[in-house]
Image (cartoon, rainbow, N blue to C red):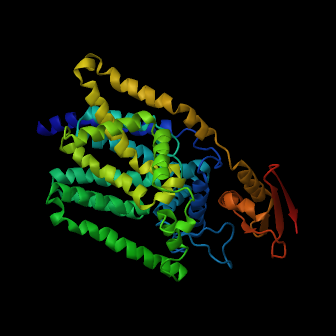
């Protein structure tokens, strides 16, 4: 009898979870097969090219190294990409193995991760508060550009957020249960997060900070969770050394210094605290909406006045996780708007929490069910024009076209010289992915090549000729 009652109690949550996952696939998955020429689509071609090399040459043969060469790599110097751990392009290569190499199979990995994240947001909201808060948070996730556009963009962020939310949900269950499966679930998700990108290292410190703040003894017996980053980071340094002969091979140190703004000579000239805060405000207002951002501000007012409960304190873990990247890598966040993605779970959960608090006010209690609908409608319309612009973006259309023509007209065994070299500054990754040919980027022609491609970016034309 108890088992039957338990099934009945969990059935609505299970059904809504399935609905949200499938609905998210449908809503976020629009334009899945669009060519990689839109806003920040250089990520798709870069990681797609690395994934294709995994697919072509095999994970074992490449020793899991991220190889950026296009065309045949035998007999040529290997270009290693070391800026991130390799899990993300490995997942894309698995998609290629099942579905073939295409734009949509590349985007399928972040799409599945984003849809899974929305399901997890629903479950976390339900666990922390109630069904309606979790459901509203999930719906908020589906009306903001950060998910509707970047949720399917082949970048690390959607995949990492999924693993972080999976780990955080396990953490919430660990707080109320000592069952071993929750600990295994937490550890495996956390390992996957660490192997995806550097922000995966930020969840454990966030949990630790909150634990110290609460004077909670929870982690006293689970301090071994810190062994995950302590083991993975030096192991990855060893992995880099194995392939490049240096612990910081592939300019890993230079990239860290550039993204963290520790070297002033390689940071934007206008990067200072005032401009940085203004830029982050711009990213939040455009990718989340001013309305949702203000709802989060209201949550903080309630929180500081101690009008919220312990569940809100637990949610602060996701807030600390999301803001850590903005603190550690301000230069990167100043340049790339999508790096505020890590705040997405915190924003939609706090937004849903505040909306239901407002709906419970005596003045509008009679219309409480209309309040979330009004906010969803406002947030959706507020950034619709910006979302439409993102979907229509085609800044790198010429590079994609050149790459496709090279692929169709030139044999894999041939080498192609692309000039002028300044065209490659933005087009290199697009040309590599779409041509899948060995490319040289130079202005001089005293080199060993078979074909030359001369591009006129101003007139949007190009010419291919045999040497």
Q: Residue at x 29, y 21 (%)?
A: 368
Residue 257, image x, y percentages: 49, 69
The residue lying toward the viewer, choosing from 408 and 127, is 127
Q: How many marks?
A: 0
Q: Residue at x 63, y 44 (%)?
A: 34
Give above or below for 357 relative to 49.
above
The residue lying toward the viewer, choosing from 116 and 227, is 227
Residue 191 is drawn in which quadrant? bottom left
Q: Residue at x 40, y 40 (%)?
A: 21
Q: Residue at x 81, y 57 (%)?
A: 455
Residue 387 is drawn in which quadrant? top right
Give above or below for 57 relative to 292.
below
The residue lying toward the viewer, choosing from 410 and 249, is 249
Examine the rendering and report whether any part of residue 393 can be seen. Answer: yes
Residue 233, image x, y percentages: 39, 72
The residue lying toward the viewer, choosing from 169 and 72, is 169
Q: Quadrant of the N terminus?
A: top left
Query: In this image, 223 relative to 375: left or right?
Result: left
Considering every residue shown, the one lying at the far top of the view is 366
Give above or below for 91 relative to 241.
above
Residue 447, image x, y percentages: 81, 76
Residue 378, image x, y percentages: 44, 27
Examine the rendering and report whether any part of residue 16 can be seen. Answer: no
Give above or below for 405 relative to 147.
below
Query: In this image, 269 relative to 417: left or right?
Result: left
Q: Quadrant of the C terminus?
A: bottom right
Considering every residue shown, the one lying at the far left of the view is 1
Query: In this image, 150 relative to 115: left or right?
Result: right
């Amino acid at each position: 009898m108890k088992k039957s009652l338990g099934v009945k109690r969990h059935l609505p949550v299970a059904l809504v979870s399935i609905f949200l996952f499938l609905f998210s696939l449908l809503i976020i998955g629009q334009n899945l097969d669009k060519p990689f020429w839109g806003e920040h689509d250089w990520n798709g071609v870069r990681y797609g090219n690395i994934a294709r090399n995994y697919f072509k040459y095999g994970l074992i043969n490449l020793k899991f190294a991220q190889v950026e060469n296009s065309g045949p790599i035998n007999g040529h110097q290997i270009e290693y990409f070391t800026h991130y751990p390799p899990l993300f392009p490995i997942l894309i290569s698995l998609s290629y193995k099942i579905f073939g190499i295409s734009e949509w199979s590349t985007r399928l990995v972040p799409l599945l991760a984003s849809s899974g994240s929305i399901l997890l947001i629903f479950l976390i909201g339900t666990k922390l508060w109630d069904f309606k808060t979790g459901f509203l948070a999930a719906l908020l996730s589906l009306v903001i550009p950060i998910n509707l556009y970047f949720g399917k963009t082949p970048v690390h962020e959607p995949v990492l957020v999924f693993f972080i939310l999976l780990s955080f949900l396990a953490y919430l269950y660990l707080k109320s249960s000592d069952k071993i499966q929750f600990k295994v679930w937490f550890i495996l998700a956390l390992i996957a997060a660490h192997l995806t990108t550097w922000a995966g290292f930020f969840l454990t410190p966030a949990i630790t900070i909150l634990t110290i703040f609460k004077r909670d003894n929870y982690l006293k017996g689970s301090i071994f969770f810190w062994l995950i980053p302590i083991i993975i980071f030096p192991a990855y340094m060893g992995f880099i050394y194995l392939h490049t002969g240096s612990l910081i091979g592939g300019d890993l140190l230079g990239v860290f210094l550039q993204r963290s703004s520790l070297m002033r000579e390689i940071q934007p000239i206008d990067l200072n605290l005032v401009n940085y805060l203004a830029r982050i405000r711009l990213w939040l207002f455009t990718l989340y909406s001013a309305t949702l951002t203000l709802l989060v501000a209201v949550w903080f007012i309630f929180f500081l006045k101690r009008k919220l409960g312990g569940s809100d304190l637990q949610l602060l873990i996701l807030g600390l996780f999301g803001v850590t990247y903005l603190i550690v890598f301000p230069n990167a966040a100043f340049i790339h708007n999508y790096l505020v993605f890590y705040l997405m779970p915190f924003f939609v959960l706090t937004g849903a929490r505040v909306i239901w608090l407002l709906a419970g006010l005596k003045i509008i209690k009679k219309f409480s069910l209309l309040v979330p609908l009004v906010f969803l409608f406002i947030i959706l319309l507020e950034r619709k024009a910006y979302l439409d612009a993102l979907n229509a973006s085609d800044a790198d259309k010429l590079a994609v076209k050149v790459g496709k023509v090279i692929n169709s007209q030139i044999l894999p065994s041939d080498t192609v010289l692309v000039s002028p070299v300044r065209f490659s500054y933005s087009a290199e990754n697009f040309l590599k992915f779409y041509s899948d040919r060995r490319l040289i980027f130079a202005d001089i022609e005293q080199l060993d090549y078979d074909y030359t491609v001369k591009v006129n970016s101003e007139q949007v034309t190009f010419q291919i000729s045999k040497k």
